[in-house]
Amino acid sequence: MSTLPQRLQALHARIEAAEHAAGRIPGTVQLLAVSKAQTAQTIRAAHEAGQTAFGENYLQEALGKMAELADLALEWHFIGPVQSNKTRPLAEHFSWVHGVDRLKTAQRLSEARPANARPLNLCLQVNVSGEDSKSGCDPQQAVTLAASIARLPRIVLRGLMAIPQPSIDIALQHRQFKMLRQLLDTANSQGLGLDTLSMGMSHDFPAAIAEGATMVRIGTAIFGPRGATQKDAQ
Ligand SMILES: *Cc1c(COP(=O)(O)O)cnc(C)c1O
């Protein structure tokens, strides 16, 4: 049995190995610890082990933990699907929202971001697998949509995010991540200045780092399996 600090340390070593293998500078990929279904106490332990950025999928669950952990300087990222009736609390309580996939949602977040807060960091989610069930915008529309979102006040469009089709097929993992990287390059060739590629989870982060991920979102490899009793599919 390993402890949480040991698992975090082992994960950092694997991230660094992937950076090295891709010829990238070690330490340039940021680790977002996905803490959905984990208790505030577990998050506190991860913070003690050096982790500061946490990703949550469910608003109510996240707000409860934020209140319990208000004494810590944590950076909260919302990585779940964004429902339009939840944009105000998201804009008020989070530093980042990753799952924006339409202009209307970005506009609502922009309007709801308190004027005295720092701009809200957004990622545009792209459906790189083409699965009907997945959220994310059509890749064909991504660059145009990114340009529209980037013009909104009180938000900063930081980059693109994807949740590819889960697969053990390494070539397929690479193709999907590469598509997102190429869209980011296209957007930047048009002057959008995006610096974030939010891609890669516990099972596929080495491929994501090889294709240019700047932020990997990892839960299981840090905290262990979430288990059937925990609400993973709310
Ligand atoms: C749950 C989740 C993750 C983390 O998945 P693991 O397989 O536990 O690493 C990453 N991104 C999103 C959007 C998620 O919902």
Image (tube, grey):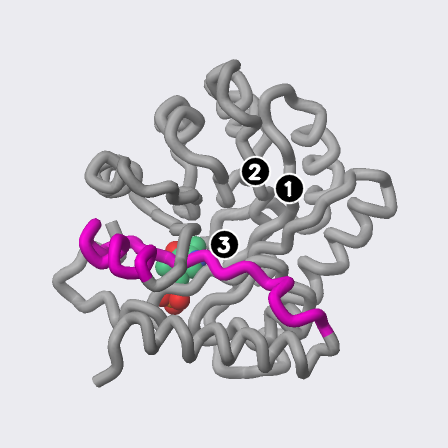
Name which of mark 1 and mark 3 comes first in the sequence: 3
Where is residue 142? Give x, y as percent.
69, 44
Q: Are marks 1 and 2 in contact (CB under 8 Å)?
A: yes
Q: Residue furthest left?
A: 229
Task: Please state which of the two labelled residues, at mark 1 or mark 3, is closer to the viewer.
Answer: 1
Residue 162, horizontal then vertical, whole percent: 56, 56
Q: Up-down: is 83 above or below 139?
A: above
Residue highlighted by disc 1 = 158
Compared across the picture, whether 78 is left or right of 39 comes to: right
Residue at (56%, 38%) from the top-left corner?
122
Residue 25 painted magenta: yes
Residue highlighted by disc 3:
132
Near mark 2 (Cα within 10 A), the count class, few <14, some 14-19 or many ≥20, is many
Image position of 87 (left or right of 126): left
Mark 3 element type: loop
**Residue 168 image point, x, y percent:** 49, 82
Q: Which residue is mark 2?
A: 122
Q: Which of the 4 image quadrants contains residue 84?
A: top left
Q: Which residues are magenta?
A: 24-48
Residue neighbourhood size for the residue with mark 3, other residues' Cα within 10 Å, grouped as few (<14), some (14–19), many (≥20): few
